[in-house]
Amino acid sequence: MSTQQVNDSTKTTSDPPSVLADSVDNGFENEYVFPRHYLPDTMKDDSKTPLVLVACGSFSPITYLHLRMFEMAQDHFKERNEYELLAGYYSPVSDAYMKEGLAKAKHRVKMCTLAVNSTSDWLMVDSWEPRQGSYQRTAVVLDHFDHELNIAGGGIRTKSGEQRKIKIMLLAGGDLIASFGHPGVWAPKDLHHIVGHYGCVIIERTGTDVYGFLLSHDILYQHRMNVTVIKQLIHNDISSTKVRLFIKRDMSIKYLSPNPVIDYIHQYGLYKAKPDSY
């Protein structure tokens, strides 16, 4: 995360995302269309709350851990009777994030798309955020999904024929949540909006004490009933940073990311040169 979370204070989460967006081409060949191909038309169980998970991040490149996060969340919600998990979305950050090692947005969206198309029948990639010419705060991105799913999309139909609002939650690793406590990184109003209004599903990563952090962070503790923590039963510490380093050192990244992603990286020579030359 960057200090843009705080400094971009002129954009309020109450405004429609279409007003907030500063959309540019960013090298994308097609016009933007919100992906809905894996969204079901009707709920299976009307007694549950319909849920969609959104993962925000760089995904430079996407790894098997990014994919596993959604599967772990799916297993978690299958065992409980509160939510019916409908679909999951990746929302890569825009080029304006300016993070070291960040490949161009068009490449990251393509790699995420290759990953989900080759491995999943319920995950999708939304290119609204990476198409933007300016950095979009996570709170604004979640508002965008709320607009597309519940306002433009009208929610989801129940078996009884009624329309029901879809709950949206941020899916994140424990390292992202730990950044909530870094001074100057996240605006308090955004944290209240993200955790209080939407909610978080946190995948606990190796070496991260999520429960201890929840106890110590005032805003997270206030909204703790809206935070779901999922433990990794098989620890996985694959990171995009390590994958990029392996590529830089001309080491194998096989089995760290899906083969179509690896082929794409080699095809375009990603992560071999300086990030600003991609």
Image (cartoon, rainbow, N blue to C red):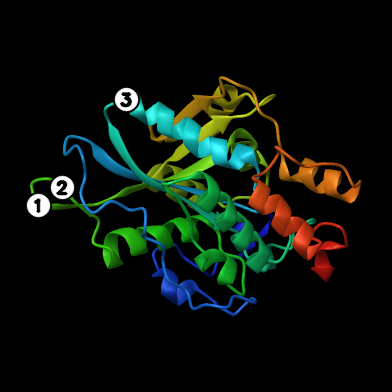
Between 224 and 199, the one nearer to me in the picture: 199
- Residue 172 x, y percent position in the rendering: 55, 40
Q: Which residue is mark 1?
A: 161
Residue at the top extreme of this rendering: 233
Q: Label 3 near label 2: C-beta < 8 Å? A: no
First in sequence, mark 3 or 1: give its number: 3
Residue shown at 46%/65% (left/top)? 12
Q: Which residue is mark 3?
A: 80
Residue shown at 64%/45% (left/top)? 258
Quarter of the picture holding the C terminus? bottom right
Residue shown at 71%/35% (left/top)? 238
Q: Which mark is residue 143?
A: none
Q: Label 1 near label 2: C-beta < 8 Å? A: yes
What is the secondary structure assignment of the residue under circle 1? loop
Between 128 and 208, the one nearer to me in the picture: 128
Disc 1 crowd rating (10 Å Cα; few below 14, some 14-19, many 20+) is: few
The amino acid at mark 1 is Gly
- Residue 30 x, y percent position in the rendering: 52, 77
- Residue 6 x, y percent position in the rendering: 61, 58
Residue 237 visible to the viewer:
yes
Q: Which residue is mark 2?
A: 158
Residue 224 visible to the viewer:
no
Disc 3 crowd rating (10 Å Cα; few below 14, some 14-19, many 20+) is: few
The amino acid at mark 2 is Thr
Query: Residue 64: which quarter of the image?
Result: top right
Image height check: is 70 above or below 150? above
The amino acid at mark 3 is Arg
What is the secondary structure assignment of the residue under circle 2? loop
What is the secondary structure assignment of the residue under circle 3? loop
> From mark 2 to mark 1, how far is it between C-alphas?
5 Å
